[in-house]
Image (cartoon, rainbow, N blue to C red):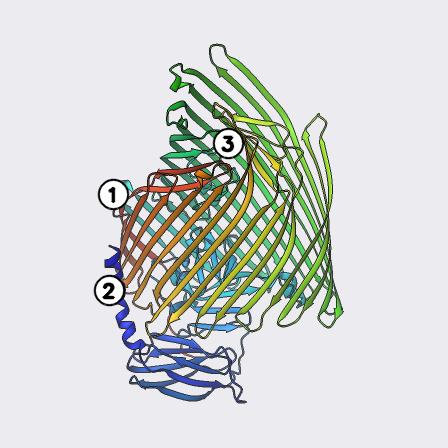
């Protein structure tokens, strides 16, 4: 199958290769004063239908060259902000064509915003790269996630994160306004790609920098989607529904109405095909419903946990935004998400001790229902040129009910069955939170002088009801088994309150120098109310009652004095911080533990931007991590009789020094991108786990300060067009080296983990008719343990993938994707080869693409399993879960108000 896919891939490259061998079209672009113009967008179009063929951007000398040109009658179009668009017709006969010097004339109407005509693929202005969505092929059913994946310099990772120019995108806007709180996952999954005219990738300054004009170096990457004119001032959206074999179904609805002052959106989803409508990372962390050990400090998660089993999803949301006057706006949204996930899995675990090792196997069944309500709102007042006020709030209510069962078997080092335990758990979790932030920025009379202040609070209440029944049979291998049943009820109430205040003052010292005084105060108050009833049933029943109230109060005050040098190409910041930490914790009505510490924390960064598209940043900082309330707790949690947890009130704070080097290089002319990051972290007095396992396989976990922890990571991504082939290739490499300690049955265990990951992606650059991707990922993890060298682990994962998307004609589209995944692990006999093949046919029933019929064929080979492996302080584990498997669905999509506006003649 892989060989056939590769042959198809090469055949599809032939048309591109035929005209990529062509001689170039060149030129030189200047303004009316004969100054060369950099970043002029040069587009090559067909005269017949103005279809985009290729594009480039002028360099610093104003020169450009376009290759990969077919023989045809063409249009050369040049566009640059503040200048009139220049167009001219040419006839290309596969001979070098020099357009010589082209002079652009200034436009009498200069716009502040980046504007793109329908045929200009990309433009650059200051810290913004703007892409014309019409220059990149999307299907009628594609969402914004599909659109972003086609843009150069943007990537969507497996966990849903959007990476732009090497940086994570933190906010997404629509027409400059927040959409569902700016949550990238919600925006990308619920808005149609064909509604977008332009995508702006913005290296956005902080609110304080935008107000004062002084760059503080604290930028964030954001994306703004601009709607097509036909989508403004009228409602638009789509409705989709489908049914298939094995009672599979789905329905999607999104409706939007955007005007210059008000924006209203409604979304809804209902399906049982494992498709979510939002970011559910918290849900995925416990997707299999077995929560008793998920909070362990794992040495290495070898792959992110995916959504296994069978999932039913219900999603509903509404958003409203209104601009009262220029730069004064209010946004609010409500989002509801129901997830019902059930299934079965089996696990194998290899555990090691200082004296002997043992194995554990289990069969698991789970059903987890999660209901989540979220309300977000914000008010922004940027109308005054001297100050800014922002107010944000979030209210959420979360309810989770989890039922799970686990049939476990313990085997000694000789492989004999010694113990079985059958557990049934019922967990109900209700959590309500409120988060409020207010920030005020004031620019003072003297240029560069300013102050800002802010207040934030987070109030949370959580109620958990736990019921657990465990039936244990021991000494099976001795022929004299003993049995006992443990019934436990535990009710927990948590109240967590956080209050924070900050104040910052900036004083200009002259010649790009600034003095900064910054203060931060944070108070965290955690309270826990526990009632636990435990009944151990043997020959004689033993009942235990545990009830207590617990508090953990932590106050942190930081005062920072800093010097900042700001110039057009360089930004240098250095500071020293005095941090005062105080903790008061323990059981209420008993003598509490009080700890007070002071730290002197240096920090600095230097940022260098030699030219547009290139940025280098080196930073150093010292971080103090206080023990959390559960790490220092003075009480014991024995809800799970096989996994007892207790804290250590004598823990000290962990001190970490961090060095980071970032390099982002993006060539606008050749669309070549290089992103690199190296980070080194060194922690002293590292807080590590201490695990004690008795002869009955009962694990007791606590914490200690033990030695140093080191971590070195190096990531690089390189992407470039291959001249002469019409393809782009991307190579990524990620390496991690980490050392840490753990304590197993009072013996120190030095752990060293090394990770190597490399990926290669090849895709065609001209995606007007065919979109093709082909590539491979290879990852290996080596983990070594001083306690048991024979159990050093090597885990490998290989993924080969191909994607083919082809417009057969104007109405019919065919899409197929094939993945082949290979897992191997020296600690487990089994290896897994997992082929996954999916396909889809889409047919437009009407000329305006309002009616679309689609046939989905998912997991055609019916490999309905999911694979998950992890390493922890003293065991390896692999879990094989059932997943949805093969399904076929026929769907219908109707576009709402998709008619185009009639063109009006300009007078």
Mark 2 vs mark 3, foreground winner is: 3
Mark 1 vs mark 3, foreground winner is: 3
Is residue 872 placed above or below 327 in the rendered structure? above
Is residue 535 placed above or below 491 in the rendered structure? above
Examine the rendering and report whether any part of residue 115 can be seen: no
Q: Quadrant of residue 27?
A: bottom left
- For mark 1, does the 10 Å Cα neighbourhood hold few (<14), some (14 to 19), or many (20 or more) residues? few
**Which circle's residue, 2 or 3, is located before the other in the chain?**
3
Q: CA distance from mark 1 to mark 3?
A: 53 Å
Please name the residue that numbered disc 2 is placed on. 808
Q: Percent x, y for residue 202?
A: 53, 65
Under circle 1, the secondary element is helix
Q: CA distance from mark 2 to mark 3?
A: 64 Å
Q: Are marks 1 and 3 in contact (CB under 8 Å)?
A: no
Examine the rendering and report whether any part of residue 785 can be seen: yes
Q: Are marks 2 and 1 in contact (CB under 8 Å)?
A: no
**Which circle's residue, 1 or 3, is located before the other in the chain?**
1
Q: CA distance from mark 2 to mark 1?
A: 27 Å
Please name the residue that numbered disc 3 is placed on. 354
Q: Is residue 776 left or right of residue 388?
A: left
Q: Is residue 139 left or right of residue 513?
A: left
Please name the residue that numbered disc 1 is placed on. 245
Q: Quadrant of residue 85?
A: bottom left
Is residue 242 placed above or below 91 in the rendered structure? above
Under circle 3, the secondary element is loop
Is residue 610 placed above or below 240 in the rendered structure? below
């Amino acid at each position: 199958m892989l060989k056939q896919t590769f042959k198809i891939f090469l055949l599809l490259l032939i048309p591109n290769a035929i005209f990529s061998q062509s001689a170039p079209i060149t030129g030189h672009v200047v303004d009316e004063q004969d100054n060369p113009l950099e970043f002029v967008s040069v587009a090559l179009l067909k005269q017949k239908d103005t279809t985009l063929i290729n594009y480039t951007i002028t360099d610093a000398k104003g020169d450009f060259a376009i290759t990969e040109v077919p023989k045809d009658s063409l249009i050369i179009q040049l566009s640059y902000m503040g200048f009139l668009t220049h167009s001219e017709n040419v006839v290309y006969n596969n001979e070098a064509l020099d357009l010589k010097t082209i002079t652009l004339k200034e436009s009498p109407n200069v716009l502040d915003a980046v504007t793109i005509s329908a045929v200009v693929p990309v433009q650059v202005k200051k810290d913004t790269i703007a892409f014309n969505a019409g220059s990149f092929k999307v299907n009628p059913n594609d969402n914004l996630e599909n659109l972003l994946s086609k843009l150069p310099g943007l990537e969507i990772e497996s966990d849903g994160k959007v990476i732009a120019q090497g940086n994570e995108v933190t906010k997404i806007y629509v027409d400059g306004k927040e959409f569902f709180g700016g949550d990238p996952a919600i925006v990308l999954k619920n808005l149609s790609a064909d509604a977008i005219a332009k995508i702006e990738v913005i290296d956005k300054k902080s609110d304080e920098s935008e107000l004062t004009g002084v760059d503080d170096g604290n930028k964030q990457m954001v994306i703004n989607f601009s709607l097509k004119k036909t989508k403004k001032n009228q409602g638009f959206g789509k409705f989709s529904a489908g049914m298939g074999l094995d009672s599979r179904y789905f329905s999607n609805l999104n409706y939007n109405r955007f005007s210059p002052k008000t924006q209203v959106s409604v979304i809804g989803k209902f399906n049982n095909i494992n498709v979510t409508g939002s970011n559910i990372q918290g849900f995925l962390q416990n997707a299999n419903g077995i929560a008793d050990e998920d909070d362990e400090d794992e040495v290495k998660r070898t792959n992110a946990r995916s959504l296994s089993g069978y999932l039913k999803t219900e999603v509903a949301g509404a958003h409203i935004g209104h601009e009262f006057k220029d730069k004064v706006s209010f946004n609010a949204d409500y989002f509801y998400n129901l997830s019902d996930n059930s299934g079965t899995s089996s696990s194998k675990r290899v555990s090691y001790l200082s004296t002997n090792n043992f194995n554990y196997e289990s069969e698991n069944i789970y059903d987890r229902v999660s209901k989540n309500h979220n309300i977000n709102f914000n008010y922004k007042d940027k109308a005054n040129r001297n100050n800014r006020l922002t107010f944000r709030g979030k209210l959420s209510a979360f309810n989770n009910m989890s039922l799970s069962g686990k049939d476990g078997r313990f085997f000694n080092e000789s492989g004999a069955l010694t113990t079985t335990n059958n557990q049934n758990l019922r967990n109900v979790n209700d959590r309500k939170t409120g988060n409020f932030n207010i920030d005020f920025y004031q620019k003072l009379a003297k240029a560069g002088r300013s102050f800002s202040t802010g207040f934030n609070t987070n109030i949370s209440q959580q109620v958990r009801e736990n019921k657990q029944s465990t039936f244990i049979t021991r000494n099976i291998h001795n022929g004299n088994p003993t049995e006992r049943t443990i019934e436990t009820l535990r009710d927990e109430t948590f109240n967590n309150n956080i209050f924070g205040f900050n104040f910052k003052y900036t004083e200009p010292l002259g010649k790009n120098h600034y003095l900064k005084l910054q203060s931060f105060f944070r108070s965290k108050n955690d309270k826990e109310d526990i009632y636990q009833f435990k009944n151990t049933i043997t020959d004689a029943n033993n009942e235990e009652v545990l009830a207590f109230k617990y508090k953990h109060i932590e106050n942190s005050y930081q005062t920072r004095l800093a010097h900042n040098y700001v110039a057009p190409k360089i930004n240098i910041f250095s500071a020293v911080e005095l941090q005062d930490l105080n903790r008061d914790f323990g059981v209420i009505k008993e003598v509490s533990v009080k700890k007070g510490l002071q730290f002197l924390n240096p920090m600095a960064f230097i940022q260098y931007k030699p030219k547009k598209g290139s940025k280098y940043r080196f930073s150093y900082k010292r971080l103090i991590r206080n023990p959390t309330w559960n790490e220092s707790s003075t009480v014991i949690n024995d809800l799970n009789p096989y996994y007892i947890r207790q804290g250590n009130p004598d823990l000290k704070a962990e001190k970490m020094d961090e060095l980071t080097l970032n390099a982002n290089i993006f060539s606008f002319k050749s669309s070549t991108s290089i992103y690199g990051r190296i980070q080194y972290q060194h922690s002293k007095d590292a807080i590590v786990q201490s695990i004690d396992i008795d002869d009955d396989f009962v694990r007791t976990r606590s914490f200690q300060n033990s030695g140093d922890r080191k971590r070195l990571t190096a990531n690089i991504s390189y992407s470039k067009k291959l001249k002469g082939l019409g393809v782009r290739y991307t190579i990524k490499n990620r390496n991690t080296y980490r050392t840490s300690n753990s304590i197993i049955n009072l013996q120190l265990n030095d752990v060293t983990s090394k990770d190597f990951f490399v990926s290669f992606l090849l895709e065609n650059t001209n995606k007007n008719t065919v979109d093709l991707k082909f590539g491979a990922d290879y990852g290996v993890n080596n983990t070594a343990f001083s306690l048991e060298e024979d159990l050093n682990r090597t885990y490998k994962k290989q993924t080969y993938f191909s994607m083919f998307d082809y417009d057969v004609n104007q109405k019919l589209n065919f899409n197929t994707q094939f993945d082949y995944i290979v897992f191997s692990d020296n600690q487990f006999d089994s290896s897994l080869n997992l082929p996954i093949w999916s396909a889809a046919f889409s047919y437009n029933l009407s000329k305006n693409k309002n009616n679309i019929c689609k046939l989905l064929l998912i997991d055609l080979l019916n490999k309905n399993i999911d694979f998950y492996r992890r390493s922890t302080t003293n065991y390896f584990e692999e879990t094989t879960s059932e997943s949805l498997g093969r399904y076929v669905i026929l769907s219908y999509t109707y576009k709402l108000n998709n008619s185009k506006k009639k063109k009006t003649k300009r007078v």
